Image (cartoon, rainbow, N blue to C red):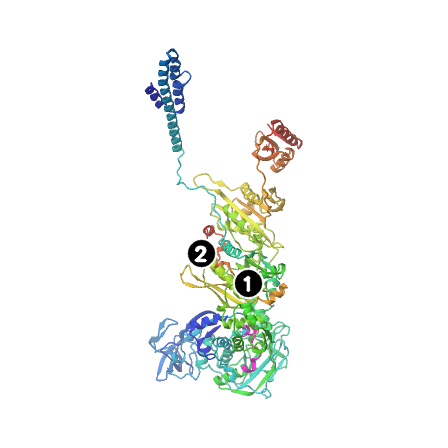
Amino acid sequence: MIDEARAEIQAAEDARALQDVRVRWLGKKGRITLELKGLATLDPDARREAGREINVVKQQVEALVEARKEELARLELARALAAERVDVTLPAAQGSSGGVHLLTKVTNRLLDVFASLGYEVVTGPELETDHYNFEALNFPPEHPARDEQDTFWTEDGRLLRTHTSPMQVRYMETHEPPFKVVVPGKVFRNEAVDATHEAQFHQLEALVVGERITMADLRGAIQEMADALFGEGTRTRLQPSFFPFVEPGAEFAIWWTHPKTGREEWLELGGCGMVHPNVFKAAGYENVTGFAFGFGIERLAMVPYGVPDIRWFYQSDLRVLRQFRGAL
Amino acid sequence: MNVPLSLLRQFVDPLPEPAELADLLAGLGLAVEAVHDQPGIPAGVIAAEIVEAEPIEGSDHLTRTVVDDGKTRRTVVCGAPNARVGVRTALALPGTHLPAIGMTVESRSVMGVESDGMLCSAKELGVYDDARGIVEYGLDVVPGARLDEAWPADVILELELTPNRADAFSLLGVARDVAAKLGQPLHDPSEAAPRGDEQGDDGLTVSLADEEGCPRLVLQRIDDVHVAPSPLWLQRHLALLGLRPRNNVVDVTNYVTFALGQPSHAYDARVLHEGHLHVRRAHADEAVELLDGETYALHERDLVIATDDASGASKAIGLAGVMGGLHDSVRDDTTTVALEVAYFNPVTVRVTAKRHGLHTDAHVRFERGVDPELQPRAAAYAASLIADVAGGTVHPATTHAGSGLTRPSIRFRPSRVAFLMAFDVPLDAQQRYLEALGCTVQLNGDDDWTVTPPTWRFDLTIEEDLVEEVARLHGYEHIGSTRPDMTFTPPRSDPTHRALRDELAAAGLHETIHYVFTGDAELARARAPEARVRLANPQGIERACLRTALYPGLLNAAVTNRGAPALALFEVGRVFLEPERERLAILQSGAVERSGWRPDVPMDVWRLKGLLSELAERRNVAFAFEPATAEEAPMLHPGVAARVVWDGKPIGFAGRLHPEVAAAYELGEVYLAEIDLPLAARRLTVQDVARQPYAERDVAIVAPRDVTYETLAHLARGAAGDRLDTLFAFDVYQGPPLAEEERSVALRLRWRDAERALRDEEVDEDLANVIRAVETAGYRIRQ
């Protein structure tokens, strides 16, 4: 009997056929059920004996049905999986993967450095007045220092800021020391445009004012920036220079390995110094000292990342922009 | 400025090796742009004198010369216009290599004439840039002399001077810093020149009508000069300084300009009417013809040098401190020179030079400030040099008008060096540094000095200036590295809109940056607002004004990338609308999703809305698109134009670019948004999540097409009762069997009670209210 049942169960090709087999053997009118019912006519001892045998068969059939059921499910799944197979090497369906501009990335990286040093980030207007861009920064009218900054003037006598330094004055007008701020932003110079000169570019300015800020604090800030950008222990250099709004003034440079040439050299970054007393006077500050430094962002984006032409930054060619997507 | 080492050595000696000297100068704040080797005259070049010169027949410019080379006479063919008898010049013997022109001279036949060598121009010799003719030397150069020995190679440091260091625009000034740093003495050759007698009569007179413009002027007479080419040493000095030798008198004045930083001008005394020279402001309608051959119409604030004409009327002959006149300078036949050495007001000179677009060696020095005490000494030095090189006699008398300027003293606390620089410099060293720079130091008491800067240091006016002087001589390498000792907690803010940029980048957009400059035509083409701010000195008409919107930049970016199948760009920047404001602009076109082998998902206005809506959701503010009028957004398709309402306030526009504008840029279907920054945000308050099931009912409303979804939604929301949880459109249909003007908007409404499950009757009642409201409003329900 069990062999007969096994053959029928194995022959069931799907869940429905298996169910039919099950009913045929184990249902209310199934063969095994009927066999069990038929036992009623036997004497108790024979009945016990026969009942045990039939129950063994019943359990075997049930187990066979279960096993076949699982097998069928497995087969079914395998069929479905095979049917749903796709070619994963076909091209992706995707939107564009965007990215922030390389200049923004470099700026962000610098802002991260200064944020970790406890600086506040502020921004200011690009259309400025002579007062904020020059006078309050100790550039007297008709001073040759103004020639260093080829200025775009507006018809009504205002100007496009030539540096981010006007924000020094604006910030000091509305805040009390001590403070540490950085100012990123666009600046403008009326210069002939070529691969390394743009009429519009970006600067980052730092200003720290307190009761007793020193030139060593300035050097320290530049050193920490250099360490963060180029690795711990990067050499920095300050050399005397002149900017009307600082005294003493300096230029600063960072010793680095040029990524293209592999040569170690000084990367001249920008100007710095102790805030000139006339600037404090214009802001109404007394008995404080401070330092300021500023530098161009483009240079820090071009040289390390091999951008050959500054004009690329503003041409918005997707083929270039796409390359800016990844991490720095 | 060029600083040739051999010339600098005349002021301070010995000097370190060139590379070390360059570092030393840079460490002093005199930035060295470049160090280069300046070759001398090549070996094989000797001096020769032309003794015969005849044009070669059949040539329009060649001359057959016979030259005396000190031993013999040889024939040389020469193409220079100044190949004439009597000229002493440079002869490159056959076999001589001239590296400047990459040529080896050989004997050869030119138009049938044997040419045995080559007469050379300065350019061919490689000593300075002048190829107009062969070099002309003075009588000091003897035929046969080896010129390579007389004109050796040198090393030149090119300095880029900052505008404060007026004093360093001279060999003397640079040498002074070097000497101070090295602790060596400074040799000033002008100190030895004998001064003229100011009481004596030299037949010259000066009047200064404008003491502000010209506080001091010295006029020195030199008689019996013989104008000729300068001696070789002086020609070499000028060449090394980057100047062209002209004649012995002019060369001396140019050399003194660079040696001492004092420009001067040599007049032929004959042009000074009755020996009188005066300085005054120009008259209206006055003009002057200057050395460059141009005639300049003068302004009443221009300072001029003048003399009287034959009629006794004052006539300008030069632009003070900028350029001399064409007719007043020394000529070949000049015998008496009147040398003008003046101090002119820096601002006066600067304004005049700027006004006339002139840039001269004299003006850059005057506008920064010449030492106002230098004139008598410089005049004596220049006169003695002229007498040396031009054979003249310096008149014992000198004419001196006006007086010098003194510099106010500065109270100086030596302790301020340590205070500002955070390194110590011993008191005696501080005093030594200041004195070496020319300051007078008076020690009043403990930490109380009175320092009087020298007259040539216009830049030293306050205590901090002196701190810098001490610090730079001591060396900035002593500056340590510390952290400011202060307590400051920066406020949290994101003024650079970094989070926004990152969100847009993550949403697949590329950030772009464009010019703030634009042109009227561009703004008109893009239908952006008219320019409010115009530049007075733009870089062309296309950059003549400041942008009033960001999206024209993005449209141009789209033009740049016209071939791209999809574009998703944004820019965060400032527009100049008075007041200037910050904006975000977005441009999207083409497919938002692409594989190539499946249908593209095209960009449309709802995706644009979705992008902005997500920004709003992250900022917990209400967000809506309202239909925008053509006046509000003329650059948009009138049927696909929205006003962006953010937290209840209109902040900009969004929609599809107007097909006419798109056509003007030759673009297809483009979607744009431009909104004001910063984007308002609200603080998040966490709400309990819904724990009860919702009950849902649908209702399709048929209304005229111009009734917006938002109107219908508002209507339904208002009637659906307090328990309405959400409402949204799940189908929008127009077409048969609806009338032409009609549209069906199917809304799905979900109600929920926070505490319990709702009964069907309750929800049905709310739905009935919605249907009633819809019908009351004149619309119908689609069954």
Q: Quadrant of residue A288?
A: bottom right
Q: Quadrant of residue B74?
A: bottom left
* Subunit of label 2: A
Kind of residue sitting beneath label 2: Tyr
* Subunit of label 1: A
Kindly state the secondary structure of the residue where label 2 is placed.
Answer: helix
* Residue A309 in view, yes or no: no
The disc, 2 or 1, on the residue closer to the chain's N-terminal end is 1
Q: Is residue A153 magenta?
A: no
Figure check: B589 above or below A47: below
Kindly state the secondary structure of the residue where label 1 is placed.
Answer: strand
**What's the mark number on residue A292?**
1
Point out residue B451 in the picture as x, y percentages from the top left corner: 58, 76
Query: What secondary structure is the magenta-colored segment mainly?
Result: helix
Q: Which residue range is magenta in the image?
A: B362-377
Kind of residue sitting beneath label 1: Ala
Circles 2 and 1 on the same subunit: yes
**The one of A34 and A312 positioned closer to us in this rendering:** A34
Neighbor class of circle 1 (other Cα within 10 Å; few <14, some 14-19, many 20+) is: many
Point out residue A284 in the picture as x, y percentages from the top left corner: 64, 64
Point out residue B218 in the picture as x, y percentages from the top left corner: 58, 82
**What's the mark number on residue A305?**
2
* Residue B265 in view, yes or no: yes
Figure check: B188 above or below B364: below
The C terminus of chain B appears in which quarter of the rendering?
A: top right
Figure check: B19 above or below A205: below
Q: Is residue B746 left or right of residue A92?
A: right
Q: Tell me the CA gap for discs 2 and 1.
A: 27 Å
Point out residue B455 in the picture as x, y percentages from the top left corner: 57, 77
> Which residue occupies 39% across, 41% down?
A89
